[in-house]
Image: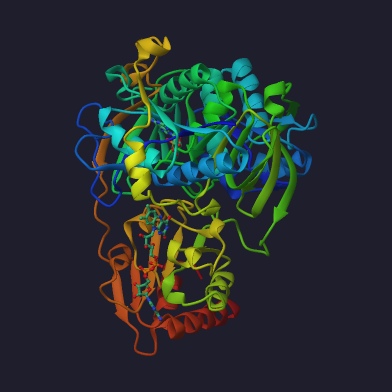
Amino acid sequence: MNIVVCVKQVPDTAVERTLTPGAGTLDRETPDGLINELDEYAIEEGLRLAEAHGGEVTILTMGPDKASESIRKALSMGADKAVHLADDALAGSDALGTSLALATVLGRIGFDLVILGSEATDARTGVLPAMLAERLGVPQLTLARKVDTDGTAISIQRQTDYGYDEVEASLPAVVSVVEKINEPRYPSFKGIMAAKKKPVETLSLADIGLDPGQVGLAAAGTEVLSFAKRPARQAGTIVKDEGDGGSKAADFLASQKFI
Amino acid sequence: MAEVLVLAEHSGETVKKVTFELLTLARRFGEPSVVWLGSGAEGARDRLAEFGAAKVYLADGDGVDDYVAAPAADVLATLTGRVSPAAVLVAATPEGKEIAGRLAVKTGSGVLTDAVDLTPASDGSGPVAEQSIFGGAIIVQSQVRAGTPIVAVRPNSVAPEPAPGAAAVEPAGAELTDAAKGARITQRVVAQRGERPELTEASIVVSGGRGVGNAENFALIEKLADSLGAAVGASRAATDAGWYPHQFQVGQTGKTVSPQLYLAVGISGAIQHRAGMQTAKTIMVINKDPEAPIFELADFGVVGDLFSVVPQLTEEIARRSQS
Ligand SMILES: Cc1cc2nc3c(=O)[nH]c(=O)nc-3n(C[C@H](O)[C@H](O)[C@H](O)COP(=O)(O)OP(=O)(O)OC[C@H]3O[C@@H](n4cnc5c(N)ncnc54)[C@H](O)[C@@H]3O)c2cc1C
Ligand SMILES: Nc1ncnc2c1ncn2[C@@H]1O[C@H](COP(=O)(O)O)[C@@H](O)[C@H]1O
């Protein structure tokens, strides 16, 4: 089975993140980058499926040169090879542009199964898996908390607010995963050494035959007009429980008409 | 006046509150038309009319309910082509966002997700969305500039306001493409529902964290939630420990909630947790550690042991609701 896992490098959520003045795009240079956490679950799921059914796991990343750090980590977890789409013209792409670029690469390299995280921690749009399925014209098996496949048919448990849906399709397909689907492995020392020799193909827009005018900031379907730091919340009332904490809390709720 | 398409969230003929919120926002940009997939539209007509729906486009049968996300996008794309709406509004639930994404690709339109407000641009160039990003640290105003504005709006962003509408039902006239029938839903498993509202939609959410101590003690959180008609949430520490199911996790890698009232019990307030609840209108905290960072967000906080504060609060709410 030919499995492609889409991995995004994102700024660490533990440090302060900002937008670049002017364009209002994410400042991707300043903070330390790491693999979007849910994508680690996507990699792990890809590795498990390949181990169970045979096949190869390819990492696909679109991002600046810096994103090669995340590609190395994914390879050291056990993925076989990687494709890195890097082109200055991609900077500032929105979901429309990103999905177009990734779908174009996927069309070129081919796949039985594409696996993504269900959401990235930077923009948190959570639309990319569905957009890719739409662009590729293959079934959308998203928000999976469990995946089963025999190499031809595939079924997932799709997480819902009320529990889950059982969903079935045939391959090729796009899958996105939620957090509790598995426990991502740590790269072993052997894995880290092996990763250094694994092939990484770097592609430009010209390589995939995509017109730079269709991606990047200029082609984005959305525009940031302005942004500002959230004003600090007004300091609230804090009381110490002296046997009447619950009752005081109820007073507050009543004053706000919640009860 | 231009139409504004609103995708209804409903279960059978019960319309979810977020739909009325979307109708309220839609009226700022034109005449709202509801898009209804599946059964129940007739029974819901009166309610939709009450909140200003001029039309109800109905797509029933043909398996619209049986496949993931794609049928709704097909129906919305057909209607978008036919009526050239001023905007398409969906609820910013995980599935709502997926539908919005597919529709954006189909129509070559920009899509904005997780809007917490939507206002007309001063120069008349369409809706301006307010979004809250990076765990709520930054507020962004943005606009769609390609195609039809598609906006996924978070539940509880606006108070639903009634306004008269005809709610005239007409067929959506959309046919599902084969591509929409790829991922078939064979079974819907309801793990835990009871009478509680859904987490992402609820006006009030009561969440428990590591301080709750174990799975059994979550009964305390559930009782408090039930006394308020609230949904129950949990921190990752609590779901990781297996005390509460993962679909109730609030935060960066869980659900984002934006309720009128968020009650954090035994939760420290890590940045990854805040990312999922910071846009709540009112925040109340119960925690025994006065230094816990969650108190920085609190409109009202009690420093104390949750095992005495929560039962007392639950009792007080019950007592006051009776009188
Ligand atoms: C990439 C990444 C993603 C993450 N995603 C999420 C996410 O989506 N959601 C999420 O919640 N976390 C997430 N986390 C984890 C997050 O960093 C915190 O570890 C987690 O939120 C802590 O949960 P907690 O507040 O329940 O536990 P703790 O931080 O241990 O806090 C427990 C609190 O309970 C209080 N307490 C204890 N006993 C009592 C008592 N008897 N009465 C009153 N108070 C009491 C303590 O004072 C303390 O403040 C993520 C972390 C990472 C690295
Ligand atoms: N630039 C990118 N390169 C590779 N994969 C991406 C990229 N952006 C998003 N993804 C994938 O899409 C998922 C959802 O991202 P998003 O829709 O941006 O929240 C992520 O978890 C990744 O798997």
Label tally: 0
**Relative to B302, residue B30 above or below:** above
For the residue pair A131 and A58, the one nearer the viewer reads as A58
Residue in the picture at 50% in, 22% down: A106
Most extreme residue toward the bottom, as rendered?
Answer: A243
Residue B290 shows in the view: yes
For the residue pair A16 and B160, the one nearer the viewer reads as A16
Image coordinates of residue B194 in percent, x first then y, are: 68, 65
Residue in the picture at 57% in, 37% down: A175
For the residue pair B152 and B273, the one nearer the viewer reads as B273
Image coordinates of residue A102 in percent, x first then y, are: 45, 24
Name the image quarter holding the C terminus of chain B: bottom right
**Relative to B37, residue B323 above or below:** below
Q: Is residue B196 left or right of residue A229?
A: right
For the residue pair A102 and B82, the one nearer the viewer reads as A102
Task: Choose top left, top right, bottom left or bottom right for residue B66.
Answer: top right
Image coordinates of residue B76 in percent, x first then y, are: 62, 26
How is this picture coloured? rainbow
Residue in the picture at 74% in, 21% down: B175
Residue B55 shows in the view: no
Most extreme residue toward the right, as rendered?
Answer: B61
Task: Choose top left, top right, bottom left or bottom right for residue B197.
Answer: bottom right
Name the image quarter holding the N terminus of chain B: top right
- Where's ligand 1: which quadrant? bottom left
Task: Choose top left, top right, bottom left or bottom right for residue A216.
Answer: top left
Image coordinates of residue A66 in percent, x first then y, are: 26, 32
